[in-house]
Image (cartoon, grey):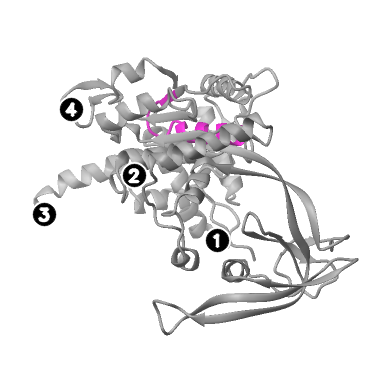
Amino acid sequence: MEWERISAHAHISGLGLDSNLKAVWKKDGMVGQEEAREAAGIVVRMIKEGKFAGNAILFAGPPGSGKTALAIGIAKELGEDVPFVHIAGSEIFSAEVKKTEFLTQALRRAIGVRIHDVRKIYEGKVEEMSVDWTQHPFNPYQKIPSGATIKLATKDEKKKLRMDQNFAIQLVQQGVEVGDVIQIDIEGQRLIKVGKAEKSSYDLSGEKIVEIPSGSVLKEKEFVYTMTLHDIDVMHSKSGISLTSLLFGAPERKEISEEVRNRVDSQVRKWVEEGMAELIPGVLFIDECSMLDIETFAFLNKAIEQDLSPIVIFATNRGITTIRGTDVKSPHGMPIDLLDRLLVITTKKYEERDIREIIKVRAEKEGVKLSEDALEKLVKIAKETSLRYAIQLLAPAWEIAKGRGEITVEDIERCYRLFVDVKRSVKYLKEMEKEMLYY
Protein backbone atom coordinates (compact mmCIF):
# COMPACT_ATOMS: atom_id res chain seq x y z
CA MET A 1 0.00 0.00 0.00
CA GLU A 2 1.42 3.40 -0.99
CA TRP A 3 1.42 6.20 1.60
CA GLU A 4 1.23 9.80 0.46
CA ARG A 5 0.46 13.20 1.89
CA ILE A 6 -1.93 15.23 -0.24
CA SER A 7 -1.21 18.91 0.08
CA ALA A 8 -3.84 21.61 -0.28
CA HIS A 9 -2.84 22.33 -3.87
CA ALA A 10 -1.62 18.90 -5.01
CA HIS A 11 -4.33 18.78 -7.69
CA ILE A 12 -3.08 21.88 -9.56
CA SER A 13 -1.05 21.24 -12.72
CA GLY A 14 -1.36 24.62 -14.48
CA LEU A 15 -3.56 27.67 -14.98
CA GLY A 16 -6.19 25.88 -17.07
CA LEU A 17 -5.99 28.10 -20.18
CA ASP A 18 -6.55 27.36 -23.86
CA SER A 19 -4.17 28.38 -26.65
CA ASN A 20 -5.68 31.87 -26.76
CA LEU A 21 -5.04 32.39 -23.03
CA LYS A 22 -8.76 32.10 -22.29
CA ALA A 23 -9.59 30.36 -19.04
CA VAL A 24 -11.49 27.08 -19.21
CA TRP A 25 -13.90 26.98 -16.27
CA LYS A 26 -12.45 23.66 -15.03
CA LYS A 27 -9.02 22.59 -16.22
CA ASP A 28 -5.64 21.59 -14.75
CA GLY A 29 -7.19 21.41 -11.29
CA MET A 30 -8.28 25.06 -11.45
CA VAL A 31 -11.93 26.05 -11.11
CA GLY A 32 -13.42 29.52 -11.54
CA GLN A 33 -11.43 32.77 -11.07
CA GLU A 34 -11.33 33.08 -14.86
CA GLU A 35 -10.21 36.71 -15.03
CA ALA A 36 -7.39 36.22 -12.53
CA ARG A 37 -6.19 33.09 -14.35
CA GLU A 38 -6.22 34.86 -17.71
CA ALA A 39 -4.21 37.73 -16.25
CA ALA A 40 -1.73 35.25 -14.80
CA GLY A 41 -1.53 33.52 -18.21
CA ILE A 42 -0.53 36.78 -19.88
CA VAL A 43 2.17 37.25 -17.25
CA VAL A 44 3.47 33.71 -17.88
CA ARG A 45 3.75 34.37 -21.62
CA MET A 46 5.65 37.62 -20.97
CA ILE A 47 7.99 35.82 -18.57
CA LYS A 48 8.73 33.12 -21.15
CA GLU A 49 9.43 35.78 -23.80
CA GLY A 50 11.72 37.71 -21.47
CA LYS A 51 9.49 40.78 -21.42
CA PHE A 52 8.71 40.95 -17.73
CA ALA A 53 12.08 41.08 -15.99
CA GLY A 54 12.22 43.54 -13.13
CA ASN A 55 8.45 43.73 -12.73
CA ALA A 56 6.25 42.56 -9.89
CA ILE A 57 2.67 41.38 -9.32
CA LEU A 58 0.24 41.55 -6.40
CA PHE A 59 -2.48 38.95 -5.84
CA ALA A 60 -5.11 40.61 -3.65
CA GLY A 61 -8.25 38.94 -2.42
CA PRO A 62 -10.09 37.53 0.58
CA PRO A 63 -8.84 34.40 2.38
CA GLY A 64 -9.51 31.17 0.52
CA SER A 65 -9.97 32.81 -2.90
CA GLY A 66 -7.12 30.98 -4.65
CA LYS A 67 -4.11 33.32 -4.46
CA THR A 68 -1.59 30.60 -3.61
CA ALA A 69 -3.24 28.31 -6.16
CA LEU A 70 -2.64 30.94 -8.85
CA ALA A 71 1.02 31.27 -7.89
CA ILE A 72 1.48 27.49 -8.04
CA GLY A 73 -0.33 27.46 -11.40
CA ILE A 74 2.16 30.03 -12.72
CA ALA A 75 5.06 27.87 -11.50
CA LYS A 76 3.64 24.78 -13.24
CA GLU A 77 3.16 26.71 -16.49
CA LEU A 78 6.73 28.04 -16.47
CA GLY A 79 8.28 24.56 -16.50
CA GLU A 80 10.25 22.17 -14.32
CA ASP A 81 13.64 23.91 -14.41
CA VAL A 82 12.27 27.42 -13.80
CA PRO A 83 13.03 28.35 -10.17
CA PHE A 84 9.99 28.99 -7.99
CA VAL A 85 10.70 30.19 -4.45
CA HIS A 86 7.79 30.42 -1.99
CA ILE A 87 8.35 32.34 1.25
CA ALA A 88 6.02 33.86 3.84
CA GLY A 89 6.43 37.47 4.89
CA SER A 90 6.91 36.41 8.51
CA GLU A 91 9.95 34.22 7.68
CA ILE A 92 12.38 37.11 7.43
CA PHE A 93 11.93 37.92 11.14
CA SER A 94 12.91 34.41 12.28
CA ALA A 95 15.98 33.95 10.05
CA GLU A 96 19.48 33.85 11.53
CA VAL A 97 20.73 36.46 9.05
CA LYS A 98 19.80 40.09 8.44
CA LYS A 99 16.53 40.84 6.67
CA THR A 100 18.27 42.21 3.58
CA GLU A 101 20.56 39.17 3.37
CA PHE A 102 17.59 36.78 3.69
CA LEU A 103 15.76 38.56 0.87
CA THR A 104 18.87 38.78 -1.32
CA GLN A 105 19.36 35.04 -1.00
CA ALA A 106 15.67 34.44 -1.77
CA LEU A 107 15.87 36.69 -4.86
CA ARG A 108 18.97 34.92 -6.16
CA ARG A 109 17.47 31.49 -5.47
CA ALA A 110 14.70 32.55 -7.86
CA ILE A 111 17.08 33.23 -10.79
CA GLY A 112 18.16 30.17 -12.74
CA VAL A 113 21.25 29.66 -14.89
CA ARG A 114 20.96 26.87 -17.46
CA ILE A 115 24.55 25.80 -18.07
CA HIS A 116 25.83 23.89 -21.11
CA ASP A 117 29.11 22.30 -20.14
CA VAL A 118 31.39 19.82 -21.95
CA ARG A 119 33.48 17.96 -19.39
CA LYS A 120 35.71 14.95 -19.11
CA ILE A 121 34.01 12.42 -16.87
CA TYR A 122 34.39 8.90 -15.66
CA GLU A 123 31.23 6.89 -16.35
CA GLY A 124 30.43 3.24 -15.83
CA LYS A 125 28.93 0.48 -13.73
CA VAL A 126 30.39 0.00 -10.25
CA GLU A 127 31.80 -3.54 -10.15
CA GLU A 128 33.84 -3.19 -6.97
CA MET A 129 33.77 -0.61 -4.18
CA SER A 130 35.74 -0.17 -0.98
CA VAL A 131 35.33 2.83 1.36
CA ASP A 132 38.01 3.79 3.89
CA TRP A 133 36.85 5.26 7.19
CA THR A 134 38.49 7.50 9.75
CA GLN A 135 37.55 8.89 13.15
CA HIS A 136 35.35 12.00 13.14
CA PRO A 137 37.45 15.02 14.22
CA PHE A 138 34.72 16.26 16.60
CA ASN A 139 33.11 12.99 17.71
CA PRO A 140 35.34 10.07 18.77
CA TYR A 141 32.38 7.67 18.63
CA GLN A 142 31.66 8.30 14.97
CA LYS A 143 33.55 7.58 11.76
CA ILE A 144 33.48 9.42 8.44
CA PRO A 145 34.73 8.44 4.95
CA SER A 146 38.38 9.31 4.28
CA GLY A 147 38.69 7.87 0.78
CA ALA A 148 37.47 5.11 -1.52
CA THR A 149 38.52 2.75 -4.27
CA ILE A 150 36.09 1.70 -6.99
CA LYS A 151 36.20 -0.30 -10.20
CA LEU A 152 34.15 1.14 -13.07
CA ALA A 153 33.21 -0.86 -16.16
CA THR A 154 31.58 -0.09 -19.49
CA LYS A 155 30.71 -2.59 -22.21
CA ASP A 156 34.20 -2.10 -23.65
CA GLU A 157 36.56 -1.20 -20.81
CA LYS A 158 37.27 -1.49 -17.07
CA LYS A 159 39.21 0.91 -14.87
CA LYS A 160 40.06 1.10 -11.16
CA LEU A 161 39.94 4.56 -9.54
CA ARG A 162 41.20 5.92 -6.23
CA MET A 163 38.99 8.68 -4.69
CA ASP A 164 39.68 11.39 -2.12
CA GLN A 165 37.47 12.24 0.89
CA ASN A 166 35.16 14.58 -1.05
CA PHE A 167 34.10 11.89 -3.53
CA ALA A 168 33.98 9.23 -0.80
CA ILE A 169 31.48 11.34 1.14
CA GLN A 170 29.35 11.72 -2.00
CA LEU A 171 29.46 7.95 -2.54
CA VAL A 172 28.08 7.37 0.95
CA GLN A 173 25.54 10.21 0.78
CA GLN A 174 24.02 8.96 -2.48
CA GLY A 175 23.95 5.35 -1.35
CA VAL A 176 26.06 4.05 -4.23
CA GLU A 177 26.33 0.25 -4.32
CA VAL A 178 27.88 -2.37 -6.55
CA GLY A 179 25.73 -2.57 -9.70
CA ASP A 180 24.97 1.17 -9.86
CA VAL A 181 25.87 3.33 -12.85
CA ILE A 182 27.62 6.54 -11.79
CA GLN A 183 29.23 9.60 -13.37
CA ILE A 184 32.26 11.34 -11.83
CA ASP A 185 33.02 14.91 -12.84
CA ILE A 186 36.57 15.53 -11.63
CA GLU A 187 36.73 19.23 -12.50
CA GLY A 188 33.33 19.99 -10.98
CA GLN A 189 34.01 17.75 -7.96
CA ARG A 190 30.63 16.06 -8.41
CA LEU A 191 29.53 12.45 -8.33
CA ILE A 192 26.12 11.52 -9.74
CA LYS A 193 24.28 8.24 -9.26
CA VAL A 194 22.49 7.66 -12.58
CA GLY A 195 20.63 4.49 -11.64
CA LYS A 196 20.84 0.72 -11.29
CA ALA A 197 22.56 -1.09 -14.18
CA GLU A 198 20.38 -3.43 -16.22
CA LYS A 199 20.76 -7.14 -15.48
CA SER A 200 22.08 -6.33 -11.99
CA SER A 201 20.57 -8.03 -8.98
CA TYR A 202 18.29 -5.52 -7.32
CA ASP A 203 15.29 -5.47 -5.02
CA LEU A 204 11.89 -3.88 -5.58
CA SER A 205 13.05 -0.44 -4.40
CA GLY A 206 11.78 1.42 -7.43
CA GLU A 207 15.29 2.52 -8.52
CA LYS A 208 15.71 3.64 -12.11
CA ILE A 209 17.13 0.93 -14.37
CA VAL A 210 19.67 2.25 -16.91
CA GLU A 211 21.76 0.77 -19.70
CA ILE A 212 25.44 0.03 -19.05
CA PRO A 213 27.48 2.73 -20.88
CA SER A 214 29.60 1.81 -23.87
CA GLY A 215 33.01 3.10 -25.01
CA SER A 216 35.83 4.08 -22.67
CA VAL A 217 35.37 4.83 -18.99
CA LEU A 218 36.92 8.33 -19.42
CA LYS A 219 35.02 10.37 -22.01
CA GLU A 220 33.86 13.85 -22.95
CA LYS A 221 30.19 14.55 -22.38
CA GLU A 222 27.94 17.61 -22.55
CA PHE A 223 25.96 18.38 -19.42
CA VAL A 224 22.93 20.66 -19.38
CA TYR A 225 21.91 21.51 -15.85
CA THR A 226 20.19 24.37 -14.07
CA MET A 227 21.58 26.06 -11.00
CA THR A 228 20.44 29.20 -9.23
CA LEU A 229 22.55 32.28 -8.67
CA HIS A 230 22.45 31.51 -4.96
CA ASP A 231 23.80 27.99 -5.60
CA ILE A 232 26.76 29.53 -7.46
CA ASP A 233 27.20 32.13 -4.72
CA VAL A 234 27.50 29.34 -2.14
CA MET A 235 30.00 27.45 -4.31
CA HIS A 236 32.20 30.55 -4.57
CA SER A 237 31.87 31.44 -0.89
CA LYS A 238 34.17 29.82 1.66
CA SER A 239 31.36 30.17 4.22
CA GLY A 240 29.00 28.09 2.11
CA ILE A 241 29.18 24.35 2.89
CA SER A 242 31.25 22.58 5.50
CA LEU A 243 32.07 18.91 5.95
CA THR A 244 29.81 18.82 8.98
CA SER A 245 26.86 20.20 7.03
CA LEU A 246 27.41 17.67 4.26
CA LEU A 247 27.24 14.82 6.74
CA PHE A 248 24.52 16.05 9.07
CA GLY A 249 22.00 17.98 6.98
CA ALA A 250 21.34 21.20 5.08
CA PRO A 251 24.03 23.89 5.20
CA GLU A 252 23.56 26.63 7.73
CA ARG A 253 22.32 29.89 6.20
CA LYS A 254 25.23 32.35 6.31
CA GLU A 255 25.85 35.80 4.90
CA ILE A 256 27.62 36.02 1.55
CA SER A 257 29.78 39.05 0.78
CA GLU A 258 28.95 41.52 -1.97
CA GLU A 259 32.37 40.84 -3.48
CA VAL A 260 31.48 37.18 -4.02
CA ARG A 261 28.14 38.08 -5.62
CA ASN A 262 29.75 40.61 -7.96
CA ARG A 263 32.29 38.00 -9.00
CA VAL A 264 29.52 35.48 -9.66
CA ASP A 265 27.50 38.03 -11.69
CA SER A 266 30.55 38.78 -13.86
CA GLN A 267 31.17 35.07 -14.39
CA VAL A 268 27.54 34.39 -15.34
CA ARG A 269 27.48 37.32 -17.79
CA LYS A 270 30.66 35.95 -19.39
CA TRP A 271 29.07 32.50 -19.74
CA VAL A 272 25.97 34.01 -21.35
CA GLU A 273 28.05 36.05 -23.84
CA GLU A 274 30.07 32.95 -24.78
CA GLY A 275 26.91 30.88 -25.28
CA MET A 276 27.76 28.53 -22.41
CA ALA A 277 24.72 29.49 -20.34
CA GLU A 278 21.35 31.19 -20.43
CA LEU A 279 19.49 33.03 -17.70
CA ILE A 280 16.08 31.76 -16.64
CA PRO A 281 13.85 34.31 -14.91
CA GLY A 282 12.18 32.56 -12.00
CA VAL A 283 9.48 33.56 -9.54
CA LEU A 284 9.76 34.70 -5.93
CA PHE A 285 6.32 34.33 -4.34
CA ILE A 286 5.97 36.29 -1.09
CA ASP A 287 2.83 35.28 0.76
CA GLU A 288 1.51 37.29 3.73
CA CYS A 289 3.28 40.36 2.29
CA SER A 290 1.45 42.62 4.77
CA MET A 291 3.80 41.13 7.40
CA LEU A 292 6.80 42.84 5.74
CA ASP A 293 8.00 46.11 7.27
CA ILE A 294 8.86 49.46 5.68
CA GLU A 295 12.59 48.63 5.46
CA THR A 296 11.85 45.39 3.61
CA PHE A 297 9.50 47.12 1.17
CA ALA A 298 12.15 49.78 0.46
CA PHE A 299 14.73 47.06 -0.23
CA LEU A 300 12.39 45.14 -2.56
CA ASN A 301 11.38 48.33 -4.36
CA LYS A 302 15.00 48.83 -5.35
CA ALA A 303 15.77 45.13 -5.90
CA ILE A 304 13.14 44.59 -8.61
CA GLU A 305 14.84 47.32 -10.71
CA GLN A 306 18.15 45.44 -10.88
CA ASP A 307 19.31 43.74 -14.10
CA LEU A 308 19.44 40.33 -12.43
CA SER A 309 16.03 40.17 -10.79
CA PRO A 310 13.31 37.49 -10.77
CA ILE A 311 9.59 38.03 -11.11
CA VAL A 312 8.32 38.98 -7.65
CA ILE A 313 4.73 38.02 -6.79
CA PHE A 314 3.18 39.40 -3.61
CA ALA A 315 -0.03 38.01 -2.11
CA THR A 316 -2.21 39.51 0.59
CA ASN A 317 -5.69 39.20 2.08
CA ARG A 318 -5.50 42.52 3.96
CA GLY A 319 -7.49 45.65 3.14
CA ILE A 320 -6.57 49.08 4.46
CA THR A 321 -4.06 48.42 7.23
CA THR A 322 -0.98 49.89 8.87
CA ILE A 323 2.37 49.53 7.15
CA ARG A 324 4.51 47.59 9.60
CA GLY A 325 7.17 49.81 11.16
CA THR A 326 5.14 53.02 10.65
CA ASP A 327 1.92 54.65 11.82
CA VAL A 328 0.70 55.05 8.21
CA LYS A 329 -2.35 53.18 6.93
CA SER A 330 -2.25 52.08 3.31
CA PRO A 331 -4.04 49.64 0.94
CA HIS A 332 -2.85 46.07 1.69
CA GLY A 333 -0.33 47.46 4.22
CA MET A 334 2.09 48.32 1.38
CA PRO A 335 3.75 51.69 0.56
CA ILE A 336 2.01 53.62 -2.23
CA ASP A 337 5.23 54.07 -4.25
CA LEU A 338 5.62 50.27 -4.42
CA LEU A 339 1.92 49.66 -5.12
CA ASP A 340 2.10 52.03 -8.12
CA ARG A 341 4.69 49.75 -9.71
CA LEU A 342 2.75 46.51 -9.32
CA LEU A 343 0.35 44.78 -11.67
CA VAL A 344 -2.53 43.99 -9.32
CA ILE A 345 -4.57 40.83 -9.97
CA THR A 346 -7.67 40.53 -7.79
CA THR A 347 -9.38 37.32 -6.75
CA LYS A 348 -13.02 37.06 -5.69
CA LYS A 349 -14.97 34.73 -3.44
CA TYR A 350 -16.03 31.59 -5.24
CA GLU A 351 -19.56 31.21 -6.56
CA GLU A 352 -21.72 28.25 -5.57
CA ARG A 353 -21.02 26.19 -8.69
CA ASP A 354 -17.27 26.81 -8.25
CA ILE A 355 -17.42 25.66 -4.63
CA ARG A 356 -19.29 22.49 -5.62
CA GLU A 357 -16.73 21.61 -8.31
CA ILE A 358 -13.70 22.38 -6.10
CA ILE A 359 -15.04 20.08 -3.38
CA LYS A 360 -15.59 17.35 -5.97
CA VAL A 361 -12.03 17.79 -7.31
CA ARG A 362 -10.55 17.61 -3.82
CA ALA A 363 -12.64 14.57 -2.91
CA GLU A 364 -11.49 12.80 -6.06
CA LYS A 365 -7.83 13.71 -5.38
CA GLU A 366 -8.05 12.37 -1.83
CA GLY A 367 -9.87 9.21 -2.93
CA VAL A 368 -13.00 10.16 -1.01
CA LYS A 369 -16.48 9.18 -2.19
CA LEU A 370 -19.33 11.61 -1.50
CA SER A 371 -23.04 11.09 -1.82
CA GLU A 372 -24.90 13.88 -3.64
CA ASP A 373 -26.65 14.93 -0.44
CA ALA A 374 -23.33 15.08 1.41
CA LEU A 375 -21.84 17.20 -1.38
CA GLU A 376 -24.72 19.66 -1.21
CA LYS A 377 -24.37 19.81 2.57
CA LEU A 378 -20.69 20.68 2.23
CA VAL A 379 -21.51 23.38 -0.35
CA LYS A 380 -24.00 24.91 2.10
CA ILE A 381 -21.43 24.80 4.91
CA ALA A 382 -18.80 26.43 2.66
CA LYS A 383 -21.16 29.30 1.85
CA GLU A 384 -21.99 29.86 5.54
CA THR A 385 -18.42 29.48 6.83
CA SER A 386 -15.54 29.10 4.37
CA LEU A 387 -14.42 26.83 1.54
CA ARG A 388 -11.32 25.85 3.48
CA TYR A 389 -13.38 24.67 6.44
CA ALA A 390 -15.68 22.62 4.20
CA ILE A 391 -12.72 20.92 2.52
CA GLN A 392 -11.13 20.18 5.89
CA LEU A 393 -14.23 18.19 6.86
CA LEU A 394 -13.61 15.69 4.04
CA ALA A 395 -10.86 13.70 5.79
CA PRO A 396 -12.57 13.22 9.19
CA ALA A 397 -15.89 12.48 7.49
CA TRP A 398 -14.21 9.78 5.42
CA GLU A 399 -12.76 8.25 8.57
CA ILE A 400 -16.26 8.06 10.05
CA ALA A 401 -17.67 6.60 6.82
CA LYS A 402 -15.03 3.88 6.40
CA GLY A 403 -16.62 0.52 5.85
CA ARG A 404 -19.69 2.02 4.14
CA GLY A 405 -17.95 3.17 0.97
CA GLU A 406 -19.24 6.76 0.82
CA ILE A 407 -19.77 9.83 2.99
CA THR A 408 -23.36 10.60 3.89
CA VAL A 409 -25.08 13.74 5.21
CA GLU A 410 -25.05 12.25 8.71
CA ASP A 411 -21.24 11.93 8.56
CA ILE A 412 -20.87 15.59 7.53
CA GLU A 413 -23.26 16.74 10.25
CA ARG A 414 -21.37 14.76 12.88
CA CYS A 415 -18.06 16.31 11.79
CA TYR A 416 -19.70 19.73 11.78
CA ARG A 417 -20.63 19.24 15.43
CA LEU A 418 -17.23 17.89 16.44
CA PHE A 419 -15.01 20.38 14.58
CA VAL A 420 -16.12 23.99 14.88
CA ASP A 421 -15.47 26.76 12.36
CA VAL A 422 -14.06 30.20 13.19
CA LYS A 423 -17.46 31.85 13.78
CA ARG A 424 -18.61 29.21 16.25
CA SER A 425 -15.19 29.28 17.95
CA VAL A 426 -15.51 33.04 18.51
CA LYS A 427 -19.05 32.58 19.80
CA TYR A 428 -17.82 29.93 22.24
CA LEU A 429 -15.08 32.25 23.50
CA LYS A 430 -17.58 35.00 24.19
CA GLU A 431 -19.86 32.62 26.06
CA MET A 432 -16.98 31.21 28.11
CA GLU A 433 -15.07 34.48 28.48
CA LYS A 434 -15.27 34.52 32.28
CA GLU A 435 -13.95 30.97 32.48
CA MET A 436 -10.88 31.66 30.31
CA LEU A 437 -7.47 32.70 31.64
CA TYR A 438 -6.22 36.23 30.94
CA TYR A 439 -2.47 35.64 31.26
Q: Which residue is mark 2?
A: 91
Q: Say which label, 1 or 2, has the lower sequence index.
A: 2
Q: Which residue is mark 3?
A: 435
Q: Say which label, 1 or 3, has the lower sequence index.
A: 1
How far is the residue under mark 4 from the one under mark 1?
53 Å
Q: Is residue 342 magenta?
A: no
* Rendered-image quadrant of the C terminus: bottom left
Which tag is nearer the camera, tag 3 or tag 2? 2
Q: Is residue 33 left or right of residue 293?
A: right
Which tag is nearer the camera, tag 4 or tag 1? 4
Which tag is nearer the camera, tag 1 or tag 3? 3
Q: Amino acid at mark 2?
A: Glu
Determine contact: label 4, label 2, CB under 8 Å: no
Determine contact: label 3, label 2, CB under 8 Å: no
Q: Position of residue 291 (x, y in %)?
A: 29, 35
Q: Which residue is mark 4?
A: 326
Q: Amino acid at mark 4?
A: Thr
Residue at 60%, 75% (x, y): give it.
147
Q: Say which label, 4 or 2, has the lower sequence index.
A: 2
Residue at 55%, 22% (x, y): give it.
43
Q: In the picture, residue 160 is in which quadrant?
A: bottom right
**Can residue 45 be seen from the camera position used here?**
yes
How far is the residue under mark 1 from the one under mark 3?
38 Å
Determine contact: label 4, label 1, CB under 8 Å: no
Q: Say which label, 4 or 1, has the lower sequence index.
A: 4
What element does badge 4 sit on? Answer: loop
Q: Is residue 183 left or right of residue 238?
A: right
Query: Which region shows up in magenta?
Result: 57-78
Q: Which residue is mark 1?
A: 402
Judge by depth and name the residue closer to the eye, 4 or 166. 166
Q: Say which label, 3 or 4, has the lower sequence index.
A: 4
Q: Amino acid at mark 3?
A: Glu
